[in-house]
Image (tube, grey):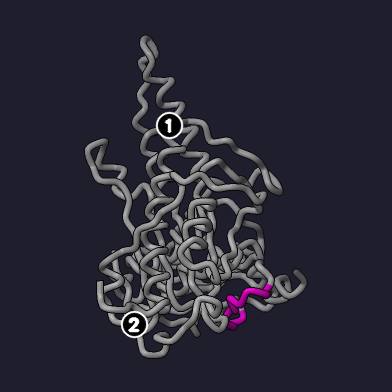
Amino acid sequence: MSGNPAMVMRVVASAYTVAEKAGAIVRKVLHSGELGIVEKTGANDLQTLADRLAQQSICASLSRHFPKLTIIGEEELPAQEVPEDLIEKGQAEEILQKGCPEEFKTLKEEELVVWVDPLDGTKEYTEASRCLQLQAVAQLPHKGSDTSQTHSTALWLLDNVTVLIGIAYGGRAIAGVINQPFYNYQHGAGAALGRTIWGMLGLGAFGFQLQEVPGDRRIVTTTRSHSNKVVTDCVSAMEPHDVIRVGGAGNKIIQLVEGKASAYVFASPGCKKWDTCAPEAILHTVGGKLTDMYGNPYSYDADVKHMNSAGVLATLHNHEYYVSRVPQSVLQALRSD
């Protein structure tokens, strides 16, 4: 550890290890088969035991290290004592060793707001669990069913799942951590599961290889489970060469930075600040941009409304083009929400 790491570097270093612990919790609950699912506002807005335990772990661990942080989590959970085995005490040494960008060196705990989505892609997580349970049943003696398709579907769904911890200062997303609990899942039981991506403005992004969509192809990534006519009209207006429908805001930003998509288009108020804070910080670190459908930035102050009511538009390049393509009918529909 360097002599006296800046406070914000210690927060990011803790967020990294806390995200990894949360990812382990997400895996453990899936493998138990007991997801404890409840509907929050409907069948497309679910909460599982993994959401609850992961958020308890993240918030309690960060609060213990940094009691003056403002931490806003997705799940509304009752105040209760968090078991000690959910507390992560470590910090990522490789982050503590990095020099803090000059503009953030003197930041104080109370100036930061941390936005937490303990399990982004909950719908895909629950669907993957059902697929794996069906596979297990099909493999019982005398069943004789080919389960390869069910297994492949489960693996694809698990790729959508992420843990998101975003750190904001002055309303701006300045650092983010994304854990993919099931990364490398397709390589079998002996493979090391999970990876953690992180980034900070003025410092860089780490844990992945930055790539871009080749040539001038427009590949749009958008929702797979929260679509409607406004969303599809907006996607069509971009004149994409291809459309990728996946779950999770964190996963969609990973599609951008790993060269699988050139724009993330979601013309709906369904996304929240905890969905976009961490991904936005990482995207901005590598030169990308995330705004609402009007091209305006979102604020991540503690007192802002949680809903990203004017939709989400994110790109690695050519952001202005995509903003210019948003139909007036779409803008009008979002304005009425």
Q: Predominant secondary structure in magenta?
A: loop
- From the viewer's perspective, tell me whether residue 129 is left or right of residue 98: right
Query: Residue 328 is drawn in which quadrant?
Result: bottom right
What is the quadrant of the C terminus in the image?
Answer: bottom right
* Residue 74 vertical placement versus 42 (above, below): below
Q: Position of residue 161 (x, y in %)?
A: 45, 51
The answer to whether residue 221 of the structure is visible from this angle is no
- SS label for mark 1: helix
Label 1 sits on what residue type? Leu
Q: Magenta residues? A: 294-304
* Residue 154 vertical placement versus 171 (above, below): above
Looking at the rendered image, the disc whose residue lies closer to the viewer, 2 or 1, is 2
Q: CA distance from mark 2 to mark 1?
A: 44 Å
Considering every residue shown, the one lying at the far top of the view is: 142
Q: Position of residue 59 (x, y in %)?
A: 53, 58
Label 2 sits on what residue type? Cys
Q: What residue does disc 1 label?
A: 132
| Image point (56%, 64%), residue name | 274
**Local crowd at mark 1 within 10 Å, few (<14), some, or many (≥20)?**
many
Earlier sequence position, callout 2 versus callout 1: 2
- From the viewer's perspective, tell me whether residue 318 is left or right of residue 301: left
**Local crowd at mark 2 within 10 Å, few (<14), some, or many (≥20)?**
many
